[in-house]
Amino acid sequence: MDHQSIWKAPRKTGDAAFIGGHRGASVEAGENSKEAFEKAILLGADFIEFDWRLTRDHVPVVFHDKDLARLHNDARAIEDVTFPELEAINPGIMTVKAALETARGRISVLLDTKITDPDTLLVGLDLLSPWLTDSVAFGTRSLEASQVVRKRMPESPVLGLFNDPADYPDLQAMGGLWARLWEEDATQSAIRSLQDQGLNVIVMVGQHVSVGVITPDAMENVLSRKPDAVMLNDVRLGLSARMRIQATASSPSTMRGG
């Protein structure tokens, strides 16, 4: 049976949080790699998140960093190299097309959109349009980028990856569906406030210097705050924590009237 998209699915109070692989199951395979995506699917994640940028010759590629320095000791920016040059440096580099084809019908996808310039973003959106489905959501980093996506791709779900939660009401007003909170900001009251505004909430665990990293106990603590989704590097850990939370909630000693 084909995977059903999580991004537009109605949510009810008490629904278990979706678990997503940050850059795929990146603890068990290289970040943003086909292997990491396949592993997340095999483990039973609800979605995978990956980053995308455009090369100089306008090929949408799966890559997090602005440049090649961290992974390949090369100071050039992704936007300054062609896809053949990038492929020569990293033979395993995936195009967004290939990544979406890997996921299609199997798992939902969050596209972390690193492109912020409106004109360049429009080019990228038009290139991606043949492979988009309801299972693919765009993660946008500003209200301006969100507006570009909403106008060009009105059927595509939009998830805000904003640093300032004060911008989320405007996102909801323009038809955005989801809001991201960092773990340190994701108090139960902050999560509930956004949900009351009509937004689903996804929590990015870890901190900016250790993105996606969390302990089992901390993961259970995050889940206890009732977000709609949680994103982390270790998909296996996230799924196990969710299972423990569900088991505890359904045990006779914790059931109402038990």
Image (cartoon, rainbow, N blue to C red):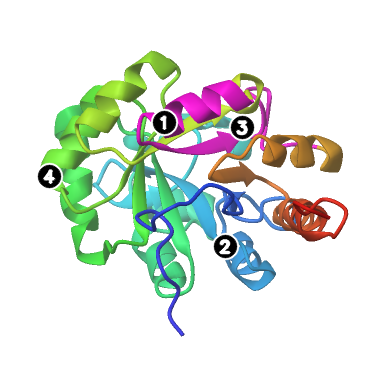
Query: Left or right: 216 with respect to 137?
Result: right
Q: Are marks 1 and 3 in contact (CB under 8 Å)?
A: no
Kindly state the secondary structure of the residue where label 1 is placed. helix
Q: Earlier in the sequence, mark 4 or mark 3?
A: 3
Q: Nearer the viewer, residue 62 or 37?
A: 37
Residues drawn in magenta:
188-214
Residue 19 visible within the image: no
Rendering quarter of residue 208: top right
Compute the Cα span from label 3 to label 2. 21 Å
Kindly state the secondary structure of the residue where label 2 is placed. helix
As for residue 206 lying within the magenta part, the answer is yes
Compute the Cα span from label 1 to label 2. 33 Å
Kindly state the secondary structure of the residue where label 4 is placed. helix
Numbered badge on residue 152: 4
Q: Are marks 1 and 2 in contact (CB under 8 Å)?
A: no
Residue 252 visible within the image: yes
Please name which of the two marks, 4 or 1, marks the residue nearer to the observer. 1
Query: Left or right: 227 with respect to 2?
Result: right
The three-letter amino acid code for the residue at tag 1 is Asp
User: In the rendered view, would you say 167 is above or below 19?
Assistant: above
Please name which of the two marks, 3 or 2, marks the residue nearer to the observer. 2
Q: Earlier in the sequence, mark 2 or mark 4?
A: 2
